[in-house]
Amino acid sequence: MKIALINENSQAGKNGLIFDILCKIAKKYGDTVVNYGMFGAEDEHSLTYVKAGLLAGILLNSGAVDFVVTGCGTGQGAMLALNSFPNVLCGHITDASDGFMFREINDGNSASFPFAKGFGWGAELDLENMFDKLLSTKGGNGYPKERAVPEKQNKQILDKVKAVTCNDMLTILKTIDQNFLKETIDYPFFRQTFFKDCKDEKIGSYLKKVLK
């Protein structure tokens, strides 16, 4: 599984710490991590949590990555932003059991963490444990096991509901404020990395036009 890390501006200073911990746990489960920034507090390319949502929507809908790890001060704003896009199911993770049950029950493809609220002594240990439980399962197995069948059915229903309530990603990219879109993706790492990993020709082609 290819995982993208996205940090918004208020917690950009923790990007290196979060990336290192995430890479450690991802390696344990045979996954890889791509750091889409922000790369530090002084990074000139600023991402708000709303931009993080748009970037996550692009990465997941294009097939450039399989999973997104993000967050903000509380984790709530980033979760809401990600969940506003099609084919994105983001959970709010505050402890290790959240991570495990979100993947097992809801089979999501992204997770948002509080990188300021409660982030004190031992925060790096808590984060390691949360990442561990989040990535320890491939998801969708159900928990507890006797609830597996109805939980899988509910996830399928949710996917169908979201398909009706959301436009497809290409339509969103074409109709969203184009300055906002370009501000989100116009930085060197995105240009260098995204188009190599993008599996959706139409999304890739459109974003190349936006970046001209």
Image (spheres, rainbow, N blue to C red):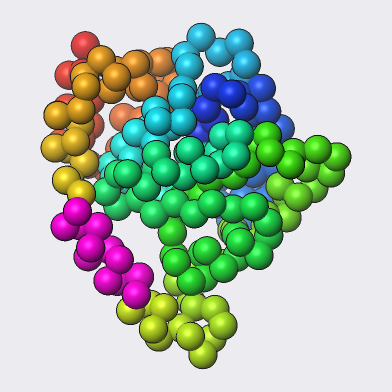
Foreground of the two, 161 or 33: 161
Q: Where 115 falls versus 38 (above or below)?
A: below
Residue 203 shows in this picture: yes
Foreground of the two, 66 or 74: 74
Q: How many marks?
A: 0
Boundaries of the magenta span: 154-165
Q: For residue 198, what is the image quadrant? A: top left
Q: Which residue corresponds to the image point at 48% horizontal and 16% vertical from the top-left?
A: 46
Q: Is residue 132 left or right of residue 32?
A: right
Residue that protrudes farthest toward the right in the picture:
121
Q: For residue 207, what is the image quadrant? A: top left
Q: Which residue corresponds to the image point at 54% horizontal and 22% vertical from the top-left?
A: 9
> x and y percent of residue 25 in the render?
67, 51
> x and y percent of residue 3 in the render?
50, 45
Q: Is residue 117 left or right of residue 12?
A: right
Q: Is residue 152 magenta?
A: no
Foreground of the two, 178 or 34: 178
> x and y percent of residue 149 in the render?
40, 85
Q: Which residue corresponds to the image point at 68% horizontal and 56% vertical from the top-left?
A: 95
Magenta span: chief secondary structure: helix
Q: Is residue 164 magenta?
A: yes
> x and y percent of residue 75 in the render?
56, 41
The C terminus is located in which quarter? top left
Residue 69 shows in this picture: no
Q: Is residue 101 left or right of residue 148?
A: right
Q: Which residue corresponds to the image point at 71% horizontal and 32% vertical from the top-left?
A: 17
Q: Where 154 falls versus 98 (above or below)?
A: below
